[in-house]
Image (cartoon, grey):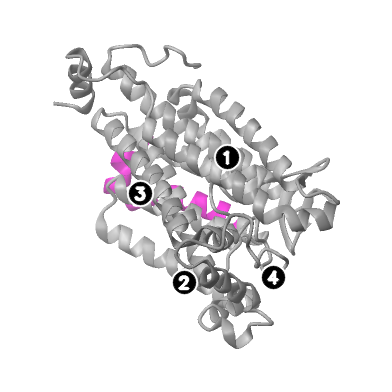
Amino acid sequence: MTASSSMAETYERGIAPIVLYDRYLLIAVGGLLALGVLMVASTSIVISERQFGGPFHFLLHQLFYLALGIGLGIYIFRISLEAWQKMGMALLLISVGLLTLVLIHGIGRQVNGSMRWLGIGPFGIQVSEFAKLAAVIYLGGYLVRHEKAVRTKVSGFLKPILLLGFVAMLLLREPDFGAATVILVTALGVLFLAGVRLWQFGVLLGAVVAAMAGLAVASPYRMERLTTFLNPWATQFDSGYQLTQSLIAFGRGGWFGVGLGDSVQKLFYLPEAHTDFLFAVLTEELGLIGSIAVLVLFAVVVVRALQIGRRAYLENRHFAAFLAYGFSLEIALQVLINVGVNTGVLPTKGLTLPLMSYGGSSLLMMCATIAILLRIDYESRITAFGYRAQLIGKK
């Protein structure tokens, strides 16, 4: 018995009401977005007052992008998965073009030594966020078209990796080591779930790890980050400053925190408190209990996404399944890297906490990602009830 027929029988018996969306996924995402707004408000008040003469500059920007993201998500939800499958290669080529434009001086906007933004008036677009979304959509379509070749031929799984490797090289030129890592590791994970032979996967994984390690060692500033996180207190007023301040925030938080809005580390002690190190301030203000609650919400999002993908795979909707697997891995990786950086388990990387950190591009693309996940789940549910997949969809 398939998952869809089981759902249909359950609803026909009147055991449960008809629900065409994943309530647990929506509740978890809603909780993370609400907590994110609260923490952006708390962490950015002081820096907003100093830079812009008002306490709510960053909060208002985050609320604007949140409203825009919800609107974008509603629109994207109405687009059928068939349409996304057709657009996969085009989206990846667009992301390559945008990543190339970012590297052109006068077009790309430099912030903190990195060329990661395209400036449009007062707004900046971080192209790497779009590239992460496009990479998963492209890979899902490629695996559906070449699923047999991926499982039986070396060239079958090398082609997408080489193309995504080129995207990663453009990201490294910015430089954005974190986004490049997320794209490549997500691609490897999806290829593994698609059934790549174990020895081939092992060789490819080893090659990617060796290449990333070589890039890290070859770059002086990356090497400094690698050595600093092992003992940040040895250089606490130099390269280890940010990490030591983050660890102090964790230490001050204790079990229940110092209280919302009462963080000391956000008072110019901890740089990037409203972006990359928001989780450290959250732990300081809400304590270990609050940070665990946030991690549980992220775990719900990842697990529900995997379950959505599994159900789609059982229904032979492989493109939908690979999309869900890719998005779940992408979210999980970003959370693991951000939390790892905040706690000193991983070297410092410029990667935000999904759905929570300040950043318009990240928030918009995460809203788009969640909307596609909900669309995958929606199409599974309406298939179970015998409805047409395009009931409210666009080709």
Q: CA distance from mark 3 to mark 1?
A: 23 Å
Amino acid type of the residue that numbered disc 3 sits on in the rendered structure: Leu
Residue 269 shows which numbered tag?
4
Name, please, the residue furthest toward the left: 1
Q: Between tags 2 and 4, which lies in front?
A: 4
Q: CA distance from mark 2 to mark 1?
A: 27 Å
Sooner in the amino-acid sequence: mark 2 or mark 3 = 3
Q: Between tags 4 and 1, which lies in front?
A: 4
In this orientation, which residue lies closer to the viewer: 123 or 155? 123
In this orientation, which residue lies closer to the viewer: 220 or 94? 220
Residue 274 shows which numbered tag?
none
Residue 74 in picture, x, y percent from top left:
55, 24
Left-right relation of 196 to 263: left
Which residue carries the number 1 mark?
A: 365
Left-right relation of 373 to 106: left
Sooner in the amino-acid sequence: mark 2 or mark 4 = 4
Residue 126 in picture, x, y percent from top left:
67, 47
Q: CA distance from mark 4 to mark 1?
A: 30 Å
Q: CA distance from mark 2 to mark 4?
A: 20 Å
Quick one: quadrant of the N terminus? top left
- Residue at image location 49% in from the left, 28% down from the top: 84
Instruction: Classify mark 4: helix, strand or loop.
Output: loop
Q: Residues within 10 Å of mark 4 (few under 14, many from 20)?
A: some
Residue 88 in picture, x, y percent from top left:
50, 34
Which residue carries the number 2 mark?
A: 345
Q: Is residue 204 visible?
A: yes
Q: Residues within 10 Å of mark 3 (few under 14, many from 20)?
A: many
Instruction: Classify mark 3: helix, strand or loop.
Output: helix
Which residue carries the number 3 mark?
A: 191
In this orientation, which residue lies closer to the viewer: 364 or 283? 283
Q: Quadrant of residue 16?
A: top left
Sooner in the amino-acid sequence: mark 3 or mark 1 = 3
